Amino acid sequence: MAKPKKTAKANKGRKIAFFDTTLRDGEQAPGFSMSAEEKLMMAGALCDLGVDVIEAGFAAASPGDADGVRRIASEIEGPTICSLSRATENDIRTAGRALEPAGKSRIHIFLGTSPIHRSAKLNMSTDEVLAAIHRSVSLAATHCDEVEFSAEDAIRTEREFLVEALECAAKAGARVLNVPDTVGYTTPDEIYDLFSHLIAKVGGTENAIFSAHCHDDLGMAVANSLAAVRAGAMQVEGAINGIGERAGNCALEEVMMVFATRKDLFNVDIDIDTTKIYPASRMLSKMTGNPVPRNKAIVGRNAFAHEAGIHQHGVLNDRRTYEIMTPEDIGLPGNALILGKHSGKHALAARAKELGFEIDDDRLAAVFIAFKAMADQFGEIADAQLIELISGVTGSASAVWRLKRVEMRAAYGAQAEPFARVELEHPERGMVTDIATGEGPIHAAFNAVQHITGMSATVEELEINHVGAKGRTDCIADIVLRINGTRFGGRSRTRDVIPAGVEAYVDAINRAAAAQNRDAFGQEKASTTTDDAKDAA
């Protein structure tokens, strides 16, 4: 897999390297395990993103981890491939063997330096720790292109001893000196002061850089990493979506977009293709089965969504009113106007037009009153609900498909074949029914919808949640389809799981059809204008 050409850079200045530990610190966290094949795919996404270092695993942890590191080292070109290692000979030699195929390799050695680690975990004196650092770094330097040393629990280590430990590592050949906040304990002011002190006091670092590895136990991993960079750190360590031990690591996508968005504040150079952030985030979410929280910065579903009427009005006029970066910057096709109880008439009218309704001002006022009542009851309103509401108030119809009935058979066994029967209604084509098979009943239902509508689609995301409010329990389904290379979202809210998923699928199909119709209308209009111009000539 070749390293891509980088397309997004911040202001010229200090080069900040990104050390991604999604496949090591992230993957070892409970609930985030990945298979060897999944780790290789994720490594490819990180390569496309442009991270400088991929920590592919902990080779000495198991034969499987060693094989995973070796495979990534063999097949991923561009980034430095790294393996974690304890300060022991066996770990170092195992890491070195696993990294042999890499174009550029790094062994990442860690050893606890804080009083609690020295006494409770290592049972070593300060002199013994220093001797272990020198011995292990010197050995590792003979097995890879470069060595990184981490003073585990550096934040709680005495400053004088931390200076000694890092200086020892640098003199032994470490080219990266990592100062990890292993337990997420520090604050931005404190870590800024610490890095400033270390950069000034640690000797022998002419050929070395300082790195920050911050955990999020107190919710400050990103802020602490940025503070470390301001103090002089040249590498930021973290993981996509902020996954990792306990509360997780610094979320690399957030740091990347801080540097890309606040070019006025951080005079640094980054070598990242930010349009690959969203695909990498979604790939990780799907592989681990852990959805990204809706309110997650940069990559959450709500990061570019707007419900408040004032915000929606502003965004409809000029996105810059409420968006400091565009969804396209991170590889997301567009923002979303969420229809709910906070929405205004402008957003309602815009969505109604997208759905094919032409509503005059008088009828829009009546629709808006009914819409507000529905929003107070249900919260966020899906398109299927809005179509029902507008049709009921105005008596008009929209040229979209509507789910009327779905039946499924969930067969079990090697010879069984699940199937589904779906009925859709269209204002022009009437009621259409299809029966289809699939890998499972809901897949069969999706196939039936494709047969009826003539739209071929691939499901990229599907999330169904139960929600309860005011004595009612509903299922909310969110889906993303890829149709002819473009992503279309769909949503549904019903009383049952089965129709919710299928209705969301139909919703996304309708949005794709509407987009095609708009494109066709635009091309027809352009063609007509050209013909008129020829006639006039």
Image (cartoon, rainbow, N blue to C red):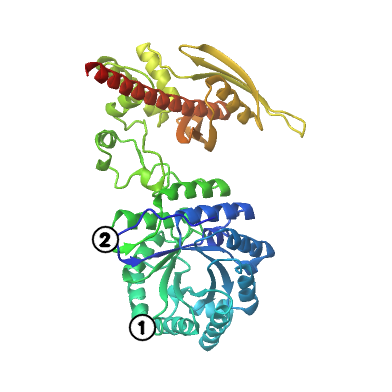
* Left or right: 126 as drawn, with respect to 416: left
Judging depth in this view, the residue of 101 and 526 nearest the camera is: 526
Question: On screen, 497 above or below 55?
Answer: above
Q: Position of residue 142 (x, y in %)?
A: 57, 79
Point out the residue furthest to the bottom here.
127
Question: On screen, 268 above or below 445?
Answer: below
Judging depth in this view, the residue of 3 and 62 nearest the camera is: 3
Residue sitting at x 41%, y 59% = 219
Residue sitting at x 36%, y 14% = 393
Write down the residue under mark 1. Answer: 201
Q: Position of residue 468 (x, y in %)?
A: 48, 33
Helix, strand, or loop for circle 1?
A: helix
The three-letter amino acid code for the residue at tag 1 is Lys
Ranked by sequence position, the earlier of labels 1 and 2 is 1
The three-letter amino acid code for the residue at tag 2 is Leu
Write down the residue under mark 2. Answer: 265
At label 1, counting other C-alpha atoms closer than 10 Å, the crowd grade (few under 14, some 14-19, many 20 or more) is: some
